[in-house]
Image (cartoon, helix red, strand yellow):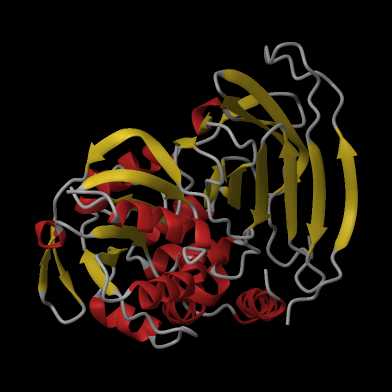
Amino acid sequence: MRIQLSILLSTFILLASTGSGCAGSADTTKVSIYKNPDTGLLTWTAIADGFSVELIQLLPDFVRAIYAKHGFSPEEIEDIASYCVFGTIIKNTSGKTLTYAVSDWRSIDAGGTEAKIKTKSQWLAQWKKAGINFSWTLLPDVGTFYAGDWQQGFTTVKLPRTSVFDLKFVWQIEGVEHVGKIKQLRCAVPGAGQ
Amino acid sequence: MSEKSNNCAAQFQGLANKMKLTQLFFTGLCLLLTTPLYAAWEQPTLGHELTALPKPVAAPGFNLRDMDDEPHSFADYRGKVILLNFWATWCPPCRREMPSMERLYQRMQNRSFVVLAINQMESPDHVFAYTGQLEVVPNFTILFDINSEVSQAYRVNGLPTSYLIDKKGNIRYRAIGGREFDHPNVEQLINTLMNEHE
């Protein structure tokens, strides 16, 4: 049975402007962190203007298991398992038409360096060259969500496993761009108790 | 994640570190564990909203086979309202919405309505084993899109994605992500489509 009493480590509001050109409004993303008491794995849930993003730490062996099951070569399995992979659930909570593109999203390392997130299309192109035709599991590159739509899939970040970094995510509601940020994300580290 | 699966993951990790299991054993273990682990993400509550397309779009045709290897053509269902659902066994919300699809199917049986659940890239044997584990065994039609060609034709980016198709073969409503399909609002939409003239 699911343990109902979650450990809420912190809830905070990011007040700093993201400099994204989102009509000058402050980033009001509310982020909560849940730590699974059994495994120590963390889940970040960001609730922003009409959009929510949930990032769930996934251990490399879990990622290996997923792709081994779908017939990937050991090389391709190790490649994606070398990334910092998060199970990701995104939801349109706006009641309006919402769009997003993962190519707009950025990881920001401790030194402030921004990097693009490897997209599903980029993975599929790589896998196609390796003769792999499996096109699911990753978070779709782009989406147009109507009221109530939501989606899930893996998000992959190419950073060392011990990195602490921020994720900047971008979405549009009826043409108006919004930007949110989840600070101090961490990869799942095997055996580290997180 | 559920307590059970997280325990499992932790134990798995511990074993991996301590015992240096071989890759082969890893793979076998992975095959056993993948589905429950993947399914263990804590999932959002399912809603019931289906969004009307701005204007009807002709649904792409298809020819697919069912669990018994019987052929099904999209054209066979002309004159019926179709709930067309794209899914896979490893997709947690797909699993969660299936009971509501079955309840809807049971309620609407013998009317001009069908549920067609198009599985992505899995074998009938695998799906058969999977359906045997479900709390509610689906009686609606399951079809197999082995190469995801039909899902590409429908421009499905993620699973589950569902469409409500009218009697003329036009896509009228869409839902991305899991839904409770036996909600009265959904049933009302279906009834409205069934009452339309061809």
Q: Relative to B172, does residue A194 appear above or below in the rendering?
A: below
Q: Residue at x 48, y 67 (%)?
A: B182
Compare residues B81 and B38 and report the one nearer the observer. B81
Question: Residue B106 sits in which quadrant?
Answer: bottom left
Q: Residue at x 56, y 46 (%)?
A: A148
In-image side of A78 versus B171 (left or right): right
For residue A85, say whether it is visible.
no
Quarter of the image with the N terminus of chain B in it: bottom right
Question: Residue A60 sits in which quadrant?
Answer: bottom right
Q: Relative to B181, does residue A96 appear above or below in the rendering?
A: above
In-image side of A41 versus A140 (left or right): right
For residue B136, say whether it is visible.
yes
Percent coordinates x, y for residue B174 in the rendering:
40, 46
Q: Relative to B1, does residue B24 appear above or below in the rendering?
A: below
Q: Residue at x 22, y 67 (%)?
A: B144
Q: Residue at x 89, y 54 (%)?
A: A9
Percent coordinates x, y for residue A65 in the rendering:
48, 68
In-image side of B119 versus A103 (left or right): left
Percent coordinates x, y for residue B44 in the rendering:
63, 58
What count of labels does the image hold? 0
Compare residues B132 and A84 and report the one nearer the observer. B132
Residue lying farthest bottom?
B132
Percent coordinates x, y for residue B4 in the rendering:
67, 81
In-image side of A158 versus A167 (left or right): left
